[in-house]
Amino acid sequence: MTTPPEPLARFIAEVRQALATPAPLAMVSAALARLVARDDWLPPAYAQPHPEHYQQYLLHADPAGRFSIVSFVWGPGQATPIHDHGVWGAVGVLRGAEQAQAYTADGAAPPRALGEPATLYAGDVEQVGPEVGDIHKVANASPAVSVSIHVYGTDIGRHPRHVYPAEGGLKPFISGYANGPDTPAFSAA
């Protein structure tokens, strides 16, 4: 573990403070908006795309398991499958653009799109979770690499979740992380 860049260290502290309130998601979202308003703090190693699929790098996992902060890196044309989270979360676009399509799914019938896709640009923040809309598909909406910062109410890379195939049903998965020796998670005071 290494020391986080100052903006990330401040954000970690703000998330910890938010968790002590009755409505942490609103406070976390506001803090995330401040974090992604500047694109000068994320070390380049945590913004490296993979040529075939999106990647997620663990930036920080709370030692008590209460939250995690992740950078998602998207090459042009890359997208997630339709999936859920099972916990609260906030997504802030740091650079580029992402398109998010909300779905409803019951795990039996094919998933059904809800409304039109939303495009998020650098600085935009979106909330996800069981109480605000938890099933979606996300894609890079930029011709270049896009990077977003996600914070979830658990260690999302170790949390059991579901993918919803187009034909219906659901498949369990655990996402893991793309971190290697040159991209350790950051510790915090």
Image: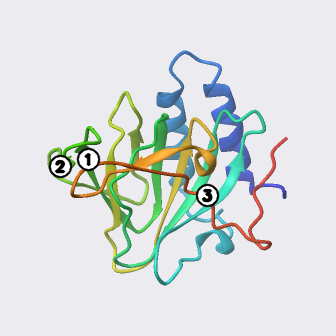
The furthest residue to the top: 22
Res. 15 image quadrant: top right
* Nearer to us in this view, 89 or 125: 89
* Nearer to us in this view, 176 or 4: 176
* Disc nearer the start of the sequence (3/2): 2
- Image quarter of the C terminus: top right
Kindly report the distance in space between the C-alpha atoms of the residues bearing marks 1 and 3: 23 Å
Mark linked to residue 102: 1
Kindly report the distance in space between the C-alpha atoms of the residues bearing marks 1 and 2: 6 Å
Q: Is label 1 in contact with label 2 (beta carbons under 8 Å)?
A: yes
**Residue drawn 34% across the image and 73% down it:** 142
**Residue drawn 55% across the image and 58% down it:** 38
Callout 1: helix, strand or loop?
A: strand
Amino acid, disc 2? Ala
* Disc nearer the start of the sequence (1/2): 1
In-image side of 56 versus 131 (left or right):
right
Residue where numbered disc 3 is placed:
176
Where is residue 131 shown, x and y percent of the image? Answer: 37, 27
Q: Is label 3 in contact with label 2 (beta carbons under 8 Å)?
A: no
Where is residue 152 shown, x and y percent of the image? Answer: 55, 41
Kindly report the distance in space between the C-alpha atoms of the residues bearing marks 3 and 2: 26 Å
Q: Is residue 133 above or below residue 149?
A: above
In-image side of 74 versus 42 (left or right):
left
**Residue drawn 53% across the image and 54% down it:** 149
Local crowd size for mark 3, using a 10 Å CA cut-off: few (<14), some (14–19), many (≥20): some
Amino acid, disc 3? Gly
